[in-house]
Image: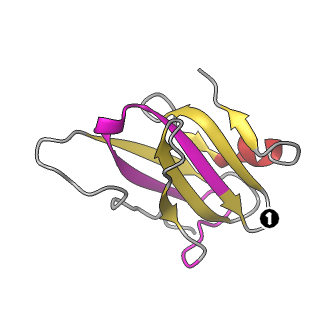
Amino acid sequence: MRIPMLLLAAVPATAGAQTYYLDVHNTAPSSLVAFAVAPVGTQTFHEIVSAEFPVHGGGDTFTIGLDAGDGCVRDVHAKFLDGRELELIGFNICKYRFETGPYWRAARTATRIAAQP
């Protein structure tokens, strides 16, 4: 049985700041060895997951807290143990849960993918 991992240190807390919580579900068959988010279009990614603490494929889940000051739409960078890597542009963290499986499959042919509106 796998136990979900909970990460809540994505951004420093500031007084009065609202926090958005994003569930990341690794449905890809490969472990997630890097996961980072950035305000859309900035390329200033903040690393959440590193290779030291991979998120295993096949169903492991974690939750991150993100500062609401940067808005709902973010760019996401993900790298998998099998070498696939992608950048998802314009992902709405307020509307969607991040499921890695569909993006892992798409990363066979493209590394920059526009998110669904």
Please state, as top left, top right, bottom left or bottom right, where the C terminus lies in the image: top right
Residue 112 position in % (x across, y down): 73, 41
Front-most of residues 7 and 14? 14
Q: Identify the magenta region.
A: 52-78
Q: Residue at x 54, y 75 (%)?
A: 53
Residue 72 position in % (x across, y down): 41, 31
Q: Residue at x 55, y 34 (%)?
A: 91
Q: Which residue is mark 1?
A: 83
Q: Is residue 57 visible?
A: yes
Outermost residue, top direction? 117
Position of residue 26 in the picture relative to residue 80 (left or right): left
Residue 69 drawn above or below residue 55: above
Q: Residues within 10 Å of mark 1 (few under 14, many from 20)?
A: few
Corner quadrant of residue 30: bottom right
Residue 17 drawn above or below residue 27: above
Please state, as top left, top right, bottom left or bottom right, where the N terminus lies in the image: bottom right
Q: Please, what is the three-letter code of the amino acid marked with disc 1?
A: Gly
Q: Residue at x 35, y 37 (%)?
A: 70
Front-most of residues 71 and 28? 71
Position of residue 78 in the picture relative to residue 2 (left or right): right
Residue 2 position in % (x across, y down): 56, 67
| Secondary structure beneath label 1 | loop
Q: Residue at x 46, y 64 (%)?
A: 5
Q: Is residue 72 magenta?
A: yes
Q: Is residue 58 visible?
A: no
Outermost residue, right direction? 109
Residue 67 position in % (x across, y down): 31, 44
Residue 12 drawn above or below residue 104: below
